[in-house]
Image (cartoon, grey):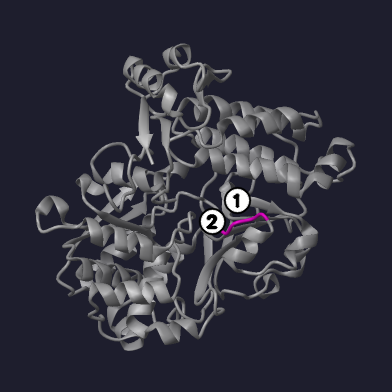
Amino acid sequence: MSAAPREETGTVLRVDWPECRARGLCAELLPERIVLDEWGYPVVLGPVPEDQLALAREAVAACPRRALHLVRG
Amino acid sequence: MRTIAPPARLEVRRGPLLLSGVDDGPGLAAHRARFGDLARLDLAAVVDRVEAASVRGRGGAGFPLARKLRTVARGRGMRPSKRPVVVVNAAEGEPASAKDEALLAVAPHLVLDGAAVAARALGARTVHVVTSLDRPLVGESVARAVAERDDGLRWTQHEAEGRFVAGQARAVLELMAGRPGLPVTAWAPEAVDGHKGRPTLLSNAESWAHLGALAQRGTEHYASFGTAQEPGTMLLTLTRPPGPDGRFDLARVVEVEHGDGAWSVLDAAALAAPLLVGGFHGAWVHPSAVAGLVWSQDHLRSVGASLGAGALVSLGDGSCPVARTAEWTEYLAAESAGRCGPCRNGLPALADEVRALAQRADTRRRIEQLTGLVTGRGACAHPDGTSRLVRTLLTALGDHVEAHLDGACGCSTQHRVRVA
């Protein structure tokens, strides 16, 4: 069970799952890209297009657990 | 809470390469007599051999070892903070697997040779060996072997907790860092940012044994086994389902050549029964497809399975795959570290639905929904692997599930599902 180096493209939102406590701010700030599952945890919908980058950065900054990250490919 | 423990008894058969010396005993002198003095290879030679032999990681992910080696080599530097680290992962958290245990019991020096050759080529000074607390004989075997060695390397042993996710790469690095040995989010591969932030070559014990065999015997000898596309051999662990006490009884560990057929290791009963390929994170294979299986990563992928760590659980005992999947999903849910929300909430919910399925409620839609919901949403692959087990019950053994729901599978009375 070893994490392989992965290839990524574009800018994507990644959740630091052990840190996330389902506060839900991210889904409020960025409903275009984040919805909540039945337990209140974020479901990330696809990569972030250019015109949503600023909003995405806001959502990242707003997370009280610092559990949301923007990652470049 | 259901637990499942590793096999009580191990039977290791002599094999063509890694297990060729099982009758010699585990000592260094016998190992050197068979495999020669420790090879001195520079980094380019090590990478060449690993590349030529297409060695892939045997811990479950199947990642090409040559690429890991190159990444570590690129990231290393002269500063101590960039000195590479080598890790032998023999934590073997999967209870259906016993091949790393067997390998370190009968041929520890082949594993350590592989790690030593890579450590020397990379300029690493310390090699870490991680074994599991619930397989104490492995740690003892490694300690005896390390005490015999004269390779100038520092060997450090660690013991991981005997739980499913403790063998995951990041969990192993956490343990080495003195924190609880549980998965955390990896922002970069271990090869780039591993132990203490250093480039870390962490691989499964069997992967190291393949490197050891390549270093000591050369590419040509290695390629005399297997096929042109997939040279060499692989280790498999064969078991029947664990008993009511949750412990696997007998595990047979065999070394097969890539390209060998299923018949080479499975008995008549196993050839006609559902087979779980790749352990509890693996995939079910329909009885009609078992006899046609070939031990090759490419072939298994083509039939929707993957070898994982090479653990095969056969229902040759006649037990019901629906009831068994319910038991094992319950076990896997309990094995979640509970750190990631989707896994902590999703796996118990999934276990409930599979148990209901075993009790003949048609919960297939909800099961599909839940497996979709947890996959890819955790620090490690535990939710993904658990989903694979359950999903392949519905896909590969769909006819059995139908019969089970109709009360016609004939095995539902043999294994009543315990309600927790």
Residue B333 is inside the magenta segment: no
Q: Please identify the residue farthest to the front as the structure is shown.
A: A51
Q: Which residues are magenta?
A: B304-308
| Chain letter of the residue carrying label 1 | B
In this picture, residue B179 sits left or right of residue B208: left
Which badge, 1 or 2, comes first in the chain's sequence? 1
Residue B273 screen position, x and y as percent: 76, 58
Look at label 2 and name its amino acid: Gly
Residue drawn at (42%, 48%) of the image: A7
Residue drawn at x 36%, y 77% as measured from the top left:
B49
Residue B267 in picture, x, y percent from top left: 72, 69
In the rendered view, would you say B99 is above or below B170? below
User: To which chain does the residue with label 2 belong?
Assistant: B
Q: Which residue is mark 1?
A: B282
Is residue A67 positioned above or below B91 on the image? above
Residue under the image location 42 percent in, 81 percent down? B21
Can you identify the residue that label 2 sits on?
B308
How far apart marks 1 and 2 lie (CA) works out to 7 Å
| Dominant SS type (magenta) | loop
Callouts 1 and 2 close, C-beta under 8 Å:
yes
Amino acid type at circle 1 is: Gly
Q: Residue furthest left?
A: B79
Q: Which mark is residue B340?
A: none
Q: Please tell me if label 1 and label 2 are on a single chain.
A: yes
Secondary structure beneath dot 1 equals: loop
Q: Which quadrant would residue B367 be assigned to in this image?
A: top right
Q: Position of residue B176 (x, y in %)?
A: 26, 46
